[in-house]
Structures are given as C-alpha cells and as structure tokens.
Image: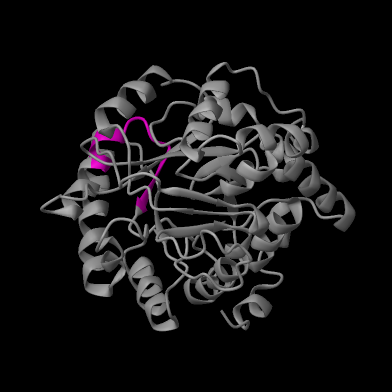
C-alpha cells in the first residue's frame, strides 16, 4: 500500500492545499475501509505505564485533533492513537496558510495554533466509542487567551478522565505564544502539581489511575533538560514524550518555505529529537517511560528511537509522505528485527545506543 500511495496517492493529495488534503484523509478514514494487513505479533506487545500496548507504534497528536477517527487509526495497525491537542474552548488557530510541505526534505512546517473544536465536541465523540478496545490517549492544551493556562490543563484532566486511557500535557508547541515558558522549572512545578492533584482527585472517584505524560520541545538545552527531568522524577510523572516540532531549520533543502514561521516536523527532526530523547533517558534513568517522536518513517527509524531510549514511538508526518500503509510496514520491519536478533520482545532493544546518541551534537 505504501509504494502505491507514494507513486499515485501522494501526487494527487499534494496537488491539494495541505489542510484540504488533511480533511480528505480524515473523511476517508471515517469510511473505516482501511485496515492493517499485518497480524498482531506478541513479540511487539509490551506494558508501559500500566497499560498493555499491542505494539510500540502510535499515531501522534496533531493528526486527529478532534477525536474523529481514533478507531480507524487503530485499524491501520497503530498500537495506540493520541487525539488532540484539545483546548477547553473551540479556537480557530492561526490565519491560513499555516501548513507548508517541504517534499525535498520529507518535512512539514506548521503554525496551526491549537485549532480544534474544543472539549465538548471531542467529549461527545469519545463518549460514543466508550467501551471499544484499543488505547486512545488525549492530548490536552490551553486556549491562547486563557487567563490561567494551567487551569485549562486541569480542566482537560477532569473532562476526559473517564474516557482517556492516558493524558499528554502539551506545553511544547511553538505556535501558541508563551506556551513553551511552562517548561521552565518553577512553572513546570506548578503545572505538574496541579495536574497530578486533579488526577488523584479524579482517580479517587473511580479507582482508575490514568497515566500522565509530558510532551517537551526538541530545542531545549542541557540545563533545561536537567530541570524537566528533576521535576518529572520528583513529582513521579508517568512518562515524557520527546519531542514536539522544532524551530531549527538546519540542513533544509527546500528554499521556498524554509523561513516560514512554525514548527518543523518530519525527517529533518529525526536526529535532533533522538539526541534529546537519549539525553533525557540518561537523566531520568531506566524506569521512567519515554515516547520517542520526530522523523519516524520506517522500521529503521522506529528501532533507532527504541535503541536510543524510547519505550514507545509515535509518528505523524511520516504518514503524510508514506501513506496509510506505513504502520503495517513498520510493524513488519520490527517483527523481522526481533526474529533476526533472536530476542523475545522488542523491548530488548531499548537503550542499546543511548550513550552513543546522547553524545552527538545537536
């Protein structure tokens, strides 16, 4: 399916404006006709943060912003799907155009700005799928004009607690002014304290303790990584997602859009995000779950993230360039790697190259 998409489907979609093409892809997934062609492999199943994942590959937030197609994504073979980013109130995001494809680089620059239909719309859709199997996480954010942005995150925890299998606290988007400031130690302490307090209150009502992950930027320096790791460990956070899009434009071939404002994702993000992932693994130790994101578009890049320190991996831009068959293709490749190495489970690869990746220059 991937090769057909790359030769025919992508050409057709790339003739369309980026957001229209995205809308079409959501509409196609709503038909529920697309399914994985690879059987489940027990060697890819693993337990992370108290959840049992059928495989380590997930769809990252940003694709299904409004929780329209999480089950359709799971049918493509993804072991989990993350919807959002969802803010309490609907917001339109930044003015168009705000998505730019860089085909020479297999990359995308976006400055969407948390455009979404808000809590209520996503809540209704997730309520309709309640009881379905599969791990669906909810990525929550703050409205651009919120007087108390931390309160928006707390509201997200409370709103979706019965429906989300896990939460992601997104404070690393570069497209909401000032949002990344919440990664600073003092602000992060208050954010995590209030969010985890809300989690404890909600869990006491239903005996379900939902994992909470923090999604960080790839543009952090070592001292900032030190602070985040220390705060995450001190407050017993359930895991960290490394990473969001980057403001860096290093090495881009595309000249037309390289200077557009926004976050860069795709292949050029792979090395930077993997280095930061490995450095975070060194800081948090072996026990805290890490999810690697950024430039995953093949079994090789997914496996590299795991070797650098990831328990799970996610992708989004890779599917834009490789098509809906990318999940099945990556899973086949990971299964082959497990057999080739003669290990019992994909988790055996974790941390094999952490030191090497962490020593590289960003």
Q: Residue 84 location in percent, x, y?
A: 39, 40
Q: Residue 182 location in percent, x, y?
A: 26, 65
Q: Which residues are magenta?
A: 156-169
Task: Examine the rendering and report whether any part of residue 291 can be seen.
Answer: no
Q: Residue 324 location in percent, x, y?
A: 66, 34
Check the image and name the residue furthest to the left: 147
Q: Residue at x 73, y 51 (%)?
A: 298
Task: Examine the rendering and report whether any part of residue 199 can be seen.
Answer: yes
Above or below, comparing residue 100 to residue 14 in the picture: below
Q: Residue at x 64, y 54 (%)?
A: 106
Q: Is residue 157 magenta?
A: yes
Q: Is residue 172 magenta?
A: no
Q: Residue 110 location in percent, x, y?
A: 44, 52
Q: How is the image coloured?
A: one colour
* 164 sits to left or right of 281: left
- Rendering quarter of residue 44: top right
Q: Count the numbered circles shown.
A: 0
* 291 sits to left or right of 237: right
């Amino acid at each position: 399916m991937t090769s057909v998409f790359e030769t025919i489907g992508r050409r057709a979609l790339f003739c369309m404006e980026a957001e229209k093409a995205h809308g079409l892809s959501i509409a196609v997934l709503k038909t529920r006709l697309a399914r994985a062609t690879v059987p489940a492999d027990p060697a890819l199943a693993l337990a992370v943060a108290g959840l049992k994942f059928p495989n380590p590959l997930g769809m990252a937030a940003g694709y299904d912003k409004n929780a329209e197609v999480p089950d359709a994504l799971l049918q493509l073979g993804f072991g989990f799907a993350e919807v959002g980013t969802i803010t309490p109130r609907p917001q339109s995001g930044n003015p168009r155009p705000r998505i730019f494809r860089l085909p020479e680089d297999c990359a995308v620059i976006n400055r969407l700005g948390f455009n979404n239909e808000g809590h209520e719309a996503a809540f209704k859709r997730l309520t309709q799928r309640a009881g379905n199997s599969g791990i669906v996480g909810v990525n929550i954010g703050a409205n651009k004009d919120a007087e108390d942005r931390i309160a928006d995150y707390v509201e997200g925890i409370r709103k979706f607690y019965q429906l989300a299998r896990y939460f992601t606290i997104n404070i690393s988007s570069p497209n909401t002014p000032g949002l990344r400031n919440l990664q600073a130690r003092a602000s992060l302490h208050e954010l995590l304290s209030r969010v985890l307090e809300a989690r404890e209150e909600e869990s006491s009502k239903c005996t379900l303790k939902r994992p909470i992950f923090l999604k960080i930027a790839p543009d952090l320096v070592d001292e900032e990584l030190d602070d985040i790791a220390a705060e995450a460990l001190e407050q017993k956070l359930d895991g960290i997602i490394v990473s969001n899009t980057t403001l860096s434009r290093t090495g881009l071939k595309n000249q037309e859009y390289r200077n557009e404002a926004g976050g860069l994702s795709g292949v050029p993000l792979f090395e930077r995000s993997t280095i930061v992932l490995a450095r975070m693994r060194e800081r948090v130790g072996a026990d805290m779950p890490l999810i690697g994101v950024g430039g995953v578009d093949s079994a090789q890049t997914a496996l590299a993230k795991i070797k650098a320190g990831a328990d799970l991996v996610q992708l989004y831009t890779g599917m834009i360039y490789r098509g809906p068959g990318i999940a099945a293709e990556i899973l086949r490749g990971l299964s082959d790697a497990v057999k080739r190495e003669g290990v019992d489970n994909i988790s055996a690869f974790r941390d094999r190259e952490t030191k090497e990746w962490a020593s590289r220059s960003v």
